[in-house]
Amino acid sequence: VINAGLYIIEPEVMKYIPKDTKYDFSKELFPHLLKLGYPLFGIKLNGVWFDVGTPKELIKAQNHLVKNSKMLPFDLPDGELTPELGYIIGNSTSASPILTTVVCEDSIVGKKSNLVDSLVMSGSKIGDNCKIIESIIGENVTISDSCELFNCVIGDNVTIDKGTILNDQKVSLS
């Protein structure tokens, strides 16, 4: 059982939640409220749930949705499912195969690039001869030719220079 989703609490409960500090509802607040005699209620929901709080989990969730798109109770955004279980959304283009990767709208993937288990957000450009593995590329990012990114998160509006190799990095403008 996973306690995830939406919590509805009475305003008076807010006084038990410390300000300006991390506080875990399931491990701290709920046990405290039970000790004080407050009632707690829940509802079980069937289906698939993913904790998308990490890049790997986000990519795992997107790949599950793409792979099982015909069984979903909703449609994926207009796009093309590739033979390699990638998904190219809207007017994006890829001159390379993308394996279990989603390329969002207005993005371009160059020639002879290899994208695996990644997410390329809107307006981004991946150059030629790049390797993007298990990475998240933010919006309006430029990855120049011959770059290699492994397990990286690249923030919005970042440019990665030609030939750059990054492993386990987070890159942002700030």
Image (cartoon, rainbow, N blue to C red):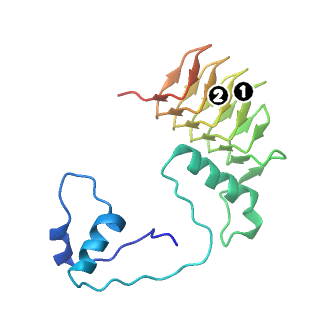
Mark 1 crowdedness (10 Å alpha carbons): few <14, some 14-19, many ≥20? many
Q: Nearer the viewer, residue 91 or 129?
A: 129
* 60 relative to 15 in the view: left or right: right
Instruction: List the residue tagged with mark 1.
Output: 110
Above or below: residue 121 compared with residue 8: above
Q: Position of residue 34 (x, y in %)?
A: 27, 80
Residue 66 is drawn in which quadrant? bottom right
CA separation in Å, label 1 and label 2: 6 Å
The extreme top residue here reads 163
* Quadrant in which residue 108 is drawn: top right
Would you place residue 56 above or below residue 144 in this image? below
Residue underneath mark 2? 126
Residue with the most extreme right position: 83
Q: Where residue 164 appears, x then y in whole percent?
A: 58, 16
**Type of the residue with mark 1:** Gly
154 to the left or right of 83: left
